[in-house]
Image: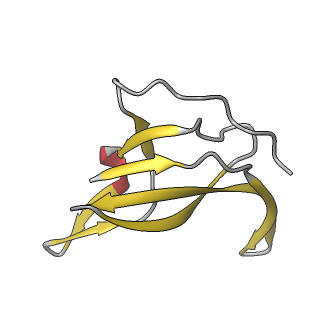
């Protein structure tokens, strides 16, 4: 499995959950499993955008509940062999 943060400008937006409004940023990623690509978005705090490049899922992305593997949130970790490129400015 390979995850790539795409070279697209991060998209700023507001998120309200349980009455609290937060500033967040969306970034587009591409997940590839056995050669089949799927695009998805991740959300991060402003200033914590991921640089363009290849990543893997960090262990804290997963949990096991009642014998089932679940992924509650995506936490990316840069691959050591990947040199991240600079992030485009948010628009």
User: Is residue 75 something one can see in this rendering?
Assistant: yes
Residue 8 located left or right of residue 19: left
Depth check: give the residue in front, 66 or 79.
79
- Residue sitting at 35 percent across and 44 percent down? 58
User: Is residue 22 something one can see in this rendering?
Assistant: no
Residue 44 located left or right of residue 4: right
- The correct choice, above or below, for 73 with respect to 57 in the image is below
Depth check: give the residue in front, 88 or 18.
88
Percent across and percent down for residue 82 are 41, 28
Say which quarter of the image contains residue 64. bottom left
- The correct choice, above or below, for 47 with respect to 90 in the image is above
Percent across and percent down for residue 34 are 21, 62
Q: How is the image coloured?
A: secondary structure
User: Which residue is farthest front?
Assistant: 35
- Residue sitting at 46 percent across and 58 percent down? 30
User: Which residue is farthest right?
Assistant: 91
Say which quarter of the image contains residue 78. top left
- Residue sitting at 72 percent across and 75 percent down? 18
- The correct choice, above or below, for 67 with respect to 55 in the image is below
Percent across and percent down for residue 12 are 80, 56
Residue 72 located left or right of residue 7: left
Depth check: give the residue in front, 51 or 43.
51
- Residue sitting at 13 percent across and 72 percent down? 67
- The correct choice, above or below, for 72 with respect to 50 in the image is below
Say which quarter of the image contains residue 32. bottom left
């Amino acid at each position: 499995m390979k995850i790539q943060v795409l070279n697209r400008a991060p998209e700023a937006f507001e998120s309200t959950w349980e009455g609290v409004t937060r500033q967040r940023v969306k970034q587009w990623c591409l997940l590839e499993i056995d050669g089949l690509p799927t695009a998805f978005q991740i959300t991060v705090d402003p200033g914590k955008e991921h640089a363009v490049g290849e990543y893997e899922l960090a262990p804290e992305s997963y949990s096991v509940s009642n014998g089932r593997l679940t992924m509650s949130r995506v936490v990316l970790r840069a691959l050591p062999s990947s040199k991240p490129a600079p992030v485009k400015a948010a628009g």
